[in-house]
Each structure stands twice: as C-alpha cells, then as structure tokens.
Image (tube, helix red, strand yellow):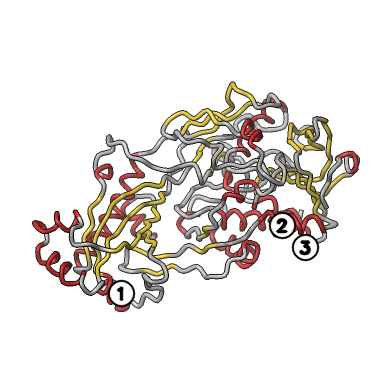
Amino acid sequence: MIVKDLLQIENKKFEVIIIGSGFAGISTALKLEKKGIETLIIEAGNLDFNETSNEFLKVDSIGDHKGDFTANRLRQFGGSSRIWGGNCNLMNSENFTNWPIKKKDLDLYSDEAREFLKLRDNFFQENVNGNLNIYNLVWSKLEIDINFYNHIKKSNLVHLSLGTTFLNFKNLGKRIVSLDCRKHNKNFNLQSKFFVLACGGIENSRLLLWCKEKNKDLLNSNLPIGKYYMHHPYHKVGQGIVNYKKLIEYFKKKNVVNRPIISCNNNIFIEANESFIKRNNINNSGIYVKFKEAYLDNNLIKQLRCFAPKFVKEIYDSIKTNDVYELEINTLQEQAPIELNNITLSNNTDPYDVPLVKLYWKKNESEIKSVRIIMEEIGKLLVDKEMGRLALEEHLYDHKINFDFVSGNHQMGGTRMGTDEKDSVVDKNLKVHGVENLFITGSSVFRTSGHCHPTFTIVQLSLRLADNLINI
C-alpha cells in the first residue's frame, strides 16, 4: 500500500517501522509480510531521483577520499540499489573470525537471498595452487523500482510512505515509542513496536549520532557510533602476459572445473585462501584479471626480452596462434577496521537543520602490503609453471607514491556488530546495545569488510533480522 497522506495512519501502531527503502529495508519488510506482520517503510526520497535531494547527502571528507558521495548515494525509493551494478559474491568463512555470528548463520538465508535478488548463476570458489582461489561474481538484473514498488502498491501488509524524512525518535528511557518525521512540509508522529534503521553505510551512523545528541537518555554514551568505517579501494596493481593454452592445461591438471572461457567472459577473479592469509598476516583482495588481445609491439613483451628471452620467444610463436593474451589487473581490497576511520557530524546542516556527515578516511600501508604479497604469489605461479609474467605497479613497493583509486561505492562499518558495546553498536541480532526495540541493518553493521561486494550479505543479514523480529 502506498501511503500518500500520513494522517491516514498517524494514530495506527505498526508492528515494525523501517527507515529506508533500499535492499536492506525492503528485504526485511517482504520477509515479515510472508509471516503476516504489518510494516511501514518510510523513505525520504520519492520514486524518481530529484537533484535537490543531494543537499541531504553532502559529506565533508577529510583524508584520502576526495570523491563526491552524492554520486554513489541516492535519496529515493530503492536507495543506492538504483545505481547498483548488479554484482554479487559471497563473504568467506575467515571474514567472520571476529564477528559474533559465523558464515553458516548467514548460509541459512542464501536461497532466499538468491530468490530476492533474482540470481540465476551459482557462486563458485576453487583452489588453484594451495594458496589461491578463483571465484566468480554473479550478476543480478533486478530492477527494484519495477519489481518491488508494484508489489508494495498491491500489498495489504507492507505500507510505503515516500517523501518522508526521519527527524528523531521519541523514547521512554531505553524504549522507543514513536518517531517524528516530515512529509509535505508537515511534521508527523508515528508509532510502532519495533524500529529498524536501514538507510545505508553512511546514513545509519549519521542518524544514530543525531539521535544520540537529541535523546540523551536513549543511547549508551560509550557506543562507538560512526567508528571503524571501511571502503573497498579499487585500483590498478599490474599488467602481464599469459599463455592461455598453458593456463587452461594447468587448471585441468588441478581439476578446476570453472575454467575461463575467453569467448564468453574475458575476466577471471582471484583471491588468497584462508591459510595463506593467516600465514602472511594480511588482508584479502579480490584480484580482477582482464584478458586482452596481445600484440608483438607490447611494451611489456619488449621489456621481457632481457629478463626472459626463452619465454618471449614462445610468446612470439604463440601470438600467431592466438594463445597469448595481455593481462590488465586491478584489485578490490579488503580494508582493515580502524577506529580512526570514522563518521562524525559536520557543522554544516541539511535543509531541515540536521547535521551533515564529516568523514575521516585514510588508506593504510597494510592494505598495499597485502595486495603486493597476493600479486607476488600469482606472479610466482605464472613463472614456476611457465605460463606468463607479471609487472606490478610501483606503488606496491613504495607507499609514498600516490596512485589513483576509486573508493566510496561500498560503504561499511560505523554501526558494527559485536558482543562488547565498547567496540560495537549492535549485537548479533542487530539490536542496538542498551535499547529495547531499535535495530540496524545494512553494510554499516559489517564488522570486517572482506573484499566481496556487500549486497548479498546485506540481504542475508536483513532476512535473518526479519526472523529475529518474528520470534521476539
């Protein structure tokens, strides 16, 4: 049901009110709907994008991130899923080492998450040399505005109010009784049994920090709200030459089933496995290897003449039979959770006088060390098996060298999950420590980032949250 006038429901007490209509909020609401539980989703934006909404999304960025956060956050129905590329992959078991839940706890929701996101292909992960895995990304073509808006429009249990801005909670001690919001330039008060913040990796922290200022007795003062913020820095780490025929023969020998077929997909994705990560005390990285047509006048081939003349001779012979490819290699990095990388409130305010975000974020030397070690292992494998050669970027060996990177699309942390409120904001069931009926879902609850795209994990967590709400 689409709620056009909040006067219709102002005196109604909902079972659950969800703030935010991205994948996190919608997947929670639709799971509750299946169990006959009535919910209200309030979304600050409208069905379509409006440029004036960017005034609510501006960020004062300090440190290494210089991008525009209004380009990767949306204040409209579906949130940032409306500009989502559709990429999904799984977090690994080692990513949950310091979480209060394990991978198996989320695996219970994998089938539901696949159905929600309309994923057709299966995930895979295969070991290639004892230290490295190849894995895949699965693409979703889900159109959230079409698939879910029309569903909610016809629903008797899921209510959606667009153009409705959350302002603050009303509480009695540690229990929230209602929330204040604004729609059509009028303020309203809405009641519910449970409240869920599902506004994204940055906005969840912003709203919770604002509530902490406005409601002195609601949130425990020592909660690390906004701390341990993480990105996935994406940057070029190398280039190379590979004999595709030898690579496939090696994969066959190792019983790798999902061998790259260049005519179908010119990418392969590589990561370190758990034992290699622990042995080298590093973070993981998703290594994105793109195969490109090779040419004899390639600079890397010319440079290799002095260092690997025998290999270069084979390259010259193999190029004629289309067995050789150039490699373009980028990485999507896991970033360690660091307390100093944090979200706080800015002195600047949005059009409703709510403070905007001030973000402090910097790269870390350990991230460069980690991707260098993984890339060296890939290079060693290619040399040992005479399959190819890599040339790594200089910044992997000198942290003083500035390099271009993309960050900010995957915003994680800030309201992280944990057992101790000194270093976490929500518990294993996503309930805010010390508050009876406030929950948070989305990538802001990630305790660590892994290197995988966060969407699938977000949906798994949100489906699990719905089950917890059902069973309370």
Query: In what element is the residue under mark 3?
Result: helix
Going by the numbered disc 1, the residue's amino acid type is: Ile
Going by the numbered disc 3, the residue's amino acid type is: Lys
Q: Which residue is drawn at 85% across and 57% down?
A: 156
Mark 1 or mark 3, which is nearer to you?
1
Q: Name the residue under label 3.
A: 34
Query: In what element is the residue under mark 1?
Result: helix
Residue 151 place in picture, x, y as percent: 76, 59
Q: Name the residue under label 2.
A: 148
CA separation, marks 1 and 2?
42 Å
CA separation, marks 2 and 3?
14 Å
- In the displayed structure, 107 sits above or below 394; it is below
Q: Is 5 or 25 nearer to us in this picture? A: 5
**Left or right: where does residue 74 sit relative to residue 307?**
right
Q: Name the residue under label 1.
A: 248
Q: Residue at x 83, y 39 (%)?
A: 190
Residue 425 place in picture, x, y as percent: 61, 40
Tell me which numbered mark, 1 or 3, is placed earlier along the sequence.
3
Tell me which numbered mark, 1 or 2, is placed earlier along the sequence.
2
Q: Residue at x 62, y 60 (%)?
A: 142
| Residue 273 appears in view | yes
Residue 182 place in picture, x, y as percent: 78, 33
Going by the numbered disc 2, the residue's amino acid type is: Phe
Residue 330 place in picture, x, y as percent: 35, 52
Tell me which numbered mark, 2 or 3, is placed earlier along the sequence.
3
Q: Which residue is drawn at 57% across and 47% down?
A: 443
**Left or right: where does residue 30 sit relative to residue 113?**
right
Task: Give the class, few, some or many, for how many residues have Cα within 10 Å of label 2's Cα (few <14, many ≥20).
Answer: some
**Left or right: where does residue 278 sit relative to residue 338?**
left
Q: Residue furthest top?
A: 347
